[in-house]
Image: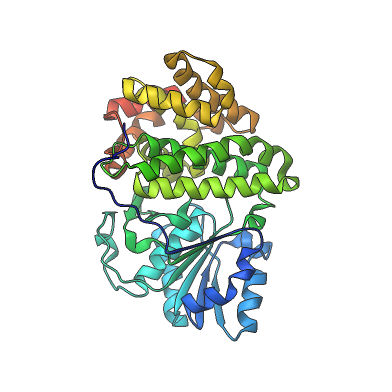
Amino acid sequence: MKANEMGKFVFNTPAGIRFGVDVLIDSVEEIIRVLGPRILVISDPELSRISLYQPLVENLIKRGIEVKIFDQVEQDPTLRNLEMAIETGVGFLATGVLGFGGGSPMDVAKLTALFLSSGENIESIWGVNKIKGPRLPLILVPTTAGTGSEVTPVSIITVENREKRGASSQVLIPDLAVLDPSLTMKLPPGITASTGIDAMVHAIEAYTSNNNNNNVISSNLAIMALDLLGSSIISVVKEGNSDQSARYNMLLGSMLAGQSFANSPVAAVHALAYPLGGKYKVSHGLSNALLLPHVMRFNMQELEIKQAYAKLAGIAFPALNEIKNTNERAELFATEFIVLSKKLGLPTRMRDINIPKEACREMSVEAMKQQRLLVNNPKTVTQKDAEKIYELAW
């Protein structure tokens, strides 16, 4: 892997990014200007229960804006879930869509904004650059520090047979991303941990991506993200609401990792993680955490990737800079993620979450359907390779 420093590349990101504590309420006038007088807010039941978006809604209503809430987004949203959101938007005559939450509400918001405007067939959108558009105006507000969906062109939906499908198009990049660290302050430790490792996976896979668009901007954003995430994740999980600066760093690191993989796409870790989420309802972040060390060791068979991992090791875990041998430092980089998961209270083996060993073969077959991602892996992954990786993770 080497960033394409001399060749052509494309770098896409939202036209506007607003970041900082309490920036959401400060951005109300801009939100109205972008989304118009009838705003469809897409969220999930838990965020409704704790009324996290209520201050925003109240401020919008005070300014004469009509707001409709669709809060039925599930973890790993299905086609039916998406259809319900679209039906709500159609009945409301929405002029704009605001996705508020983790990756699932933001992914549903992206496609809802698309289908409320474009009228294209959903079966035609899956894959890379298949979407024609246009879409309704779109703003995304993340409440977790992990997916980076607020700055990416990707939406993931679970379709028939619990297969996860992805649509990737710059049409899905929002007009505005609003990142307010205060919205993440009350995240439970488990979600904080798994989404945080998810963001670290984004940075690692973007940095080592075999995609032709791997470029100097994406590479440097990945490095910055790993620095922020690696230095903050233990504190933010262990100290929770008391360390506001760590929450700030995690959300910023997650966004930077999102910008990186939005342009230098992720690979085998994500491809192998999807069957875990689709078939066994394992959260996306935890799926990535379980598989990352084993995919890394597989990729290390390529010398260039081993050297890249050795470089990243000292950024994510500065203590590893004391290890001068490249091979040893790269291997310890993979091991350190297992150690990190243990420190964060996450399971480290698939058997720990009751995944049967015989599932390894079935999941390896399913993972091969994720060619959109597998083509970006720095080492070719066969079905037998995938099955072996699952077995090592078991």
Could you tell me which residue is drawn at 42 percent across and 43 percent down? 279
**In the rendered view, does 270 fall on the left or right side of 44?**
left
Name the residue nearer the viewer: 139 or 278.
139
121 and 340: which one is in front? 340
Residue under the point 29% across and 64% down = 122
- In the picture as drawn, the residue positioned furthest to the right comes out as 242
> Looking at the picture, how far across and down is residue 38, in whole percent?
50, 81
**Which quadrant of the figure contains the N terminus?**
top left
Visible residue check, residue 394: no
Residue farthest front in this picture = 6
Q: Position of residue 284 (x, y in %)?
A: 48, 44
- Image-quadrant location for residue 180: bottom right
Image location of residue 86, percent across then percent down: 41, 71
Q: Is residue 262 above or below residue 380?
A: below
Answer above or below: position of 364 versus 320.
Answer: below
Q: Nearer the viewer, residue 80 or 173?
A: 173
Q: Position of residue 314 (x, y in %)?
A: 52, 26
Relative to 39, 87 lies left or right? left
**Outermost residue, bottom side:** 64
